[in-house]
Image: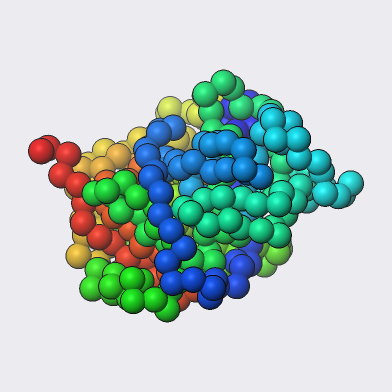
Amino acid sequence: MLRTPARILLVLAALLFAAPARATTVAGEQSYHIAYSDRLVTDVFVNGRGPFTFLIDTASSRTVIFEHVRKAIGLGYSSPDPITVYGINDAVSARAARPDTIHVAGIDVKGITIGVLPDIAQRGDPDGVLGTDILARYFVVLDRKTMKLRLLNRDSDQARAYANWSSVPLQLRPLKTLPVQFWFMTVRYNDHPVSTLLDLGAGLTLLNWDAADQMDVLKKNFTKYGPPPEEVRDVLGKVAPAIVVKGVAIRMPDHAWHKQEVLVSDAPVFDFLEMSDRASAILGPGLLKDNSLAIDFQGGRLYLGPAIDQSQ
């Protein structure tokens, strides 16, 4: 998730993921933490410099840094031509750079082109985004009990040990008009199945009005609220009402989250992702942050592990 000049968070779309890593059984592990409105964050070194704070983002096709990181490590641009990063509303043009190494979870990733975006973030914001160009090479584990990010070979015994967790299929769905793909799953909201984008870079659960109507939250009853505030219309839309619905039950196999808050809006992101013609949702770590997770990108499954009991 990145920030626009108006300080609006962007959702970065997923492109074709990289080929699976075969060189090692266990790539490694390192700590992660929860910050920036329930997002998942870890340290990354670029060309041996750092650590820099990166968001873990399953809906970002590309690893991205901000300009201040590029300057700090003396990294030059690798091409005069821009590259495209697909955001929540449109396509964002970024400069291309090719660092010697990106170090995360005990591995050195080499030979990838990353995006460089202007320094629009304020002091204290993340330095970059760890995208699926790195993550999708591995079987990714987020162990909530130990707060460890693990990157495994999906054919390893360590990865196969997570097969006893409950899981939900992930479908890699391409867009018709853009060369991008996204991971979707079916999630039940108040027992209504809704096609849902998995986005660990998003800090909230967002439903469109078609999905809300299934739960008898009718758009016509909320038109009196008018459009969203001016500062968030790029994200939530200029006309449609945007409301917070409380007490929603969200379910996946063998897991349920009761009395949840979800945001409902016909946001521009649903048009951009070709999701506006049906009941749709976007789900991120705002819901899943207290569960251990394992993601098999190549096998197309999200595994759901134990949750931390916050009452203890």
Q: Tell me the residue at 20%/47% (across/down).
A: 308
Judge from the rendering whether residue 120 lies leftward or rightward of residue 51; answer left or right: right
Colour pattern of the rendering: rainbow
Nearer to me, 46 or 244: 46
Residue 85 at x, y = what percent? Answer: 69, 49
Q: Nearer the viewer, residue 116 or 197?
A: 116
- Left/right placement of residue 136 relative to residue 96 reads left
Q: Is residue 219 placed above or below 28 in the rendered structure? A: above
In this view of the protein, can residue 189 be seen by the observer? Answer: no
Q: Quadrant of the N terminus?
A: top right
Residue plotted at (32% across, 65% down): 303
One can see residue 31 in this view? yes
**Whether residue 291 is situated above or below residue 168 in the rendered picture:** above
Instruction: Give the residue drawn at x 66%, y 58%.
Output: 110
Location of residue 177 in the rendering, given as x and y in whole percent from the top left corner: 71, 63
Query: x%, y% of residue 279?
Result: 44, 58
Residue pictured at 24% horizontal, 68% vertical? 165
| Residue 281: image location, x then y, percent | 43, 53
